[in-house]
Image (spheres, rainbow, N blue to C red):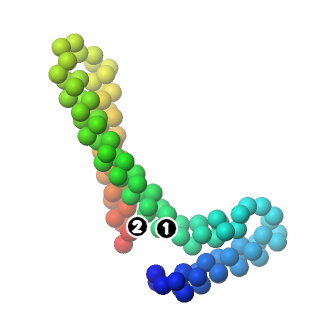
Amino acid sequence: EDEANIAYQKFNNAWEVLKAKKEFENRGNLVVKALTKVYLKSIYVGILALIKTLATVVSPLVLYAFVNYSNQQKENLHEGLFLVGCMIVVKVVESISQRHWFFYAR
């Protein structure tokens, strides 16, 4: 399914369908629409991988900020709760995006 001939056939089929529709609806770029129609799942998998990678990068930064907060003499409850909330949100986003990435990649 990754051969160039099969990819061309998929793109050509999507192109012909969109070209037939374009006669009735005169708007949009056909190339972008055809590529999106054919490779939407692959694009979605790539976006999920990017989100997981970004969450993986942000997680240690939030943890570092929380450690710095906990070492301060003067404590601000709102700042601490904000950092804990950020840490939870980042880990939830990382976990969900990783699970969806693995699910759609198979």
Q: Quadrant of residue 17?
A: bottom right
Any part of residue 101 in sight: yes
Residue 13 has which mark?
Answer: none
Residue 29 against residue 94 in the figure, above or below:
below
Q: Quadrant of residue 87?
A: top left
Q: How many marks?
A: 2
Drawn side of residue 18 relative to residue 57, left or right: right
Q: Hey, which residue is sitting farthest bottom in the picture?
A: 5
Drawn side of residue 60 relative to residue 23, left or right: left
Residue 105 against residue 56 in the figure, above or below:
below
Where is residue 47 shown, x and y percent of the image? 45, 57
* Label 2: how many Cα within 10 Å (few below 14, some 14–19, many 20+): few
Q: Quadrant of the C terminus?
A: bottom left
Where is residue 49 shown, x and y percent of the image? 38, 58
Residue 104 has which mark?
Answer: 2
Please, what secondary structure does the residue beneath circle 1 have?
A: helix
Name the amino acid, label 1.
Answer: Lys
Residue 102 against residue 93 in the figure, above or below:
below
Mark 2 or mark 1: whose residue is earlier in sequence: 1
Image point (58%, 82%), residue name: 8
Image point (29%, 35%), residue name: 62
Where is residue 1 shown, x and y percent of the image? 46, 83
Name the amino acid, label 2.
Answer: Tyr
Image point (38%, 69%), residue name: 105
Q: CA distance from mark 2 to mark 1?
A: 7 Å
Question: Which residue has dot 1 on it?
Answer: 41
